[in-house]
Image: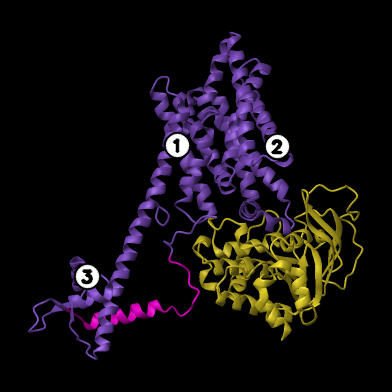
Chain colours: A yellow, B purple
């Protein structure tokens, strides 16, 4: 993960807008872990107001792309802009839902408490969440049908409910951009329906929703924008244009047999 | 302190021990939640060379210089560990093991060297191996109280940030919190707790005073605040108890006694805590099994009644056996009978026992049937369900 010091010329104070018309703009991005190249020369534009899926096989760099965009992983080269600004200037304006398995759900806290964590930045130093934060957290939980579980200890929630709590934590920020890492992994059908309905509502209210997704069979019904990734960008654009058998083959290669069904769907 | 009736040496020792236990307990809660228990063990062992260096430089058993030395070599050990993990292919546990043993070895070499010099004051240094509460002086209390208050102040001021960083550091970074500095502050606080606790428990067993109160406290509560407070209380009780016992038995090192008391708290908590305790879970599981058996008997009787269009259909024992796969235990049926849900009847000319549902039994069976079909498919498992830890 080491990189030459001059690889990322922009400074944090660089306020010059760069592609302000794009919700997410990625240019010449290359990321490597040790000797493994995770992402190679990524150029990417996701316009505002779309619901975008990022798909690709395991190890294709989907999560790495999100983490690099969010500043969690340092790239070897390239840069990232959200609405024209570097991520450091967009803190608090990006709602992030990490993979559910990334935390210890046995942590001693309640569902509402986790959702309130989404407000900590806005509260600022030395201030405790009060009535206002409580009301906002309850409203966010209600959006996901979780209001009855607000005081439940988080280890007592099912996987789908935990995922809803995580999404409520991002929702409570009321951010213009929402980024979710595999939100539908391992959740039940009813939770998936609740999540998708909410994400579509957010999209329809003008927000940009970016989702790392693994289920090709639902790409066409859930999303209107698609990024196909396998270390490089294979295709990007409106789902109707990008979701083609050729692109699926190029993205998934030898795993093609396993995704024969979605390929057929792609032809119809 | 005299106002509290805690004058004299015993009062000083007790107060000091309780204070050290409380500090360790409070900060240990964060160390355990952040999975830094073994880092604590390494820091404690790595303090030994610092203790000896502090003594050599000061020439006396001056607490301030000894603690400064302990803190310095502890920090050096933490740095060495970080470098090994980042720059080599060694995993965390191997890095911890190497750093722990190297620093401890240097510490023992220095300790034996100092003791060989014949300085009378150096005799007290060996107490840092296993702790000696009796060595706590009244002047030391001010150092401990100062460290304790400072730690408490920082924890209160950064409470919500510490909570977020302990639960989900990645999310905290996306939020723009200075995660590196918050984690560093938590680690420094833990190191501080270890360094001041060394006098009581000693470098060898110090990690137990950090982990045990937190592990015990976690069993009793689902709130971070309550866990930290409870952990501090358990730490204080262990410290004071250990000091009291070792003060009354000549030559008994305090550390092992403190650790045994704290371990007692852990044992009781693991077994008996409501919700998470082993005994509690066994009892709850037993109740759950009994409820399921009840449900099966009642719904079977109801099914037979419905099939025969006779609400008072007398079911023979063999029918229950066939439907349930095994004959319900007599005590089980007697229990349902005592609750007025079923009643034994005769069905001449047959001589075998028969059972029928009472009207209360029908109501109960219908209620249980409804519970089998939850209105919402996605309901939480009952609180007693044990989730595998990730």
Closer mark to the observer between disc 1 and disc 2: 2
Which residue is at 64% across, 66% downward? A169
Q: Are marks 3 and 1 in contact (CB under 8 Å)?
A: no
Residue A114 sits inside the magenta stretch: no
| Residue B231: % across, % down | 50, 45
SS class, disc 2: helix
Q: Are marks 1 and 2 in contact (CB under 8 Å)?
A: no
Q: Is residue B68 above or below residue B173?
A: above
Whichever of callouts 1 and 2 sits on the residue coming sooner in the sequence is 2
Badge 1: few (under 14), some or many (20 or more) residues near its Cα, within 10 Å? many
Q: Quick check: can you spot residue B137? A: no
Which residue is at 72% across, 37% downward? B83
| Residue B94: % across, % down | 62, 37
Q: CA distance from mark 3 to mark 1?
A: 52 Å
Whichever of callouts 3 and 1 sits on the residue coming sooner in the sequence is 1
The residue indicated by pointer 2 is B84
- Residue A174 vs residue B169, the one in the foreground: B169
Badge 3: few (under 14), some or many (20 or more) residues near its Cα, within 10 Å? some
Question: In which chain is the residue bearing label 3?
Answer: B
The residue furthest top is B118
- Left of B213 or right of it: where is B361? left
Q: CA distance from mark 3 to mark 2?
A: 64 Å
Closer mark to the observer between disc 3 and disc 1: 3
The residue indicated by pointer 3 is B327
| Residue B349: % across, % down | 7, 84
Which residue is at 46% across, 24% downward? B9
Closer mark to the observer between disc 3 and disc 2: 3
SS class, disc 1: helix
- Magenta stretch bounds: B355-382
The residue indicated by pointer 1 is B238
């Amino acid at each position: 993960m080491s990189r030459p010091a001059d690889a990322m010329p922009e400074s944090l104070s660089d306020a010059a807008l760069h592609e302000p018309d794009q919700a997410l703009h990625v240019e010449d991005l290359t990321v490597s872990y040790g000797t493994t190249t995770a992402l190679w020369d990524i150029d990417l534009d996701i316009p505002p107001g779309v619901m975008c899926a990022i798909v690709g096989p395991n190890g294709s760099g989907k999560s790495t792309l999100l983490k690099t965009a969010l500043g969690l992983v340092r790239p070897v080269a390239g840069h990232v802009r959200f609405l024209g600004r570097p991520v450091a200037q967009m803190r608090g304006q990006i709602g992030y839902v990490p993979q559910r398995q990334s935390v210890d759900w046995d942590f001693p806290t309640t569902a509402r408490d986790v959702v309130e964590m989404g407000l900590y930045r806005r509260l600022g130093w030395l201030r405790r969440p009060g009535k206002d934060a409580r009301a906002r957290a309850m409203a966010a939980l209600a959006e996901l049908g979780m209001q009855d579980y607000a005081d439940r200890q988080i280890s007592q929630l099912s996987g789908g409910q935990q995922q809803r709590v995580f999404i409520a934590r991002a929702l409570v920020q009321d951010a213009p951009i929402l980024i979710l890492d595999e939100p539908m992994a391992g959740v039940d059908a009813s939770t998936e329906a609740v999540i998708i309905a909410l994400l579509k509502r957010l999209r329809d209210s003008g927000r940009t929703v970016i989702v790392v997704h693994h289920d090709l069979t639902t790409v066409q019904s859930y999303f209107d924008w698609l990024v196909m990734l396998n270390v490089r960008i294979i295709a990007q654009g409106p789902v109707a244009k990008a979701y083609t058998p050729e692109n699926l083959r190029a993205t998934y290669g030898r795993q093609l047999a396993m995704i024969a069904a979605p390929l057929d769907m792609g032809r119809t | 302190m005299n106002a509290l009736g805690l004058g004299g040496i015993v009062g000083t020792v007790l107060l000091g021990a309780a204070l050290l236990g409380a500090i360790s307990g409070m900060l240990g809660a964060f160390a355990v939640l952040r999975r830094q228990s073994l880092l604590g063990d390494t820091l404690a062992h790595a303090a030994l060379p610092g203790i000896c260096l502090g003594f050599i430089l000061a020439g006396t058993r001056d607490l301030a210089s000894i603690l400064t030395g302990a803190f310095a070599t502890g920090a050096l050990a933490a740095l060495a560990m970080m470098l090994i993990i980042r720059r080599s292919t060694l995993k965390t546990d191997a890095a911890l093991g190497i750093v722990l043993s190297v620093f401890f070895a240097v510490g023992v070499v220095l300790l034996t060297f100092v003791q060989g010099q014949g300085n009378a004051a150096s005799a007290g240094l060996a107490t840092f191996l296993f702790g000696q509460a009796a060595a706590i002086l009244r002047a030391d209390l001010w150092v401990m109280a100062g460290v304790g208050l400072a730690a408490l102040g920082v924890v209160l001021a950064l409470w919500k940030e510490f909570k977020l960083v302990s639960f989900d550091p990645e999310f905290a970074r996306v939020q723009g919190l200075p995660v590196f500095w918050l984690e560093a502050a938590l680690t420094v606080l833990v190191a501080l707790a270890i360094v001041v606790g060394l006098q009581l428990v000693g470098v060898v067993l110090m990690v137990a005073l950090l982990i045990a109160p937190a592990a015990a406290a976690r069993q009793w509560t689902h709130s971070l605040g309550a866990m930290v407070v409870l952990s501090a209380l358990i730490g204080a009780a262990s410290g004071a108890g250990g000091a009291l016992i070792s003060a009354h038995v000549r030559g008994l090192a305090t550390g092992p006694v403190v650790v045994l008391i704290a371990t007692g708290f852990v044992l009781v908590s693991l077994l008996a805590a409501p919700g998470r305790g082993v005994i509690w879970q066994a009892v709850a599981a037993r109740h759950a099994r009994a409820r399921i058996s009840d449900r099966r008997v009642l719904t079977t009787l109801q099914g037979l009644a419905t099939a025969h269009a006779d609400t008072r259909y007398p079911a023979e024992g063999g029918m229950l056996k066939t439907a349930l796969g095994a004959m319900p235990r007599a005590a089980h049926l007697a229990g349902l009978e005592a609750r007025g849900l079923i009643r034994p009847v005769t069905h001449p000319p047959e001589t075998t026992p028969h059972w029928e549902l009472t009207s209360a039994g029908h109501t109960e069976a219908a209620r249980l049937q409804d519970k089998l079909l939850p209105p919402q498919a996605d309901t939480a498992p009952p609180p007693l369900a044990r989730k595998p830890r990730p």
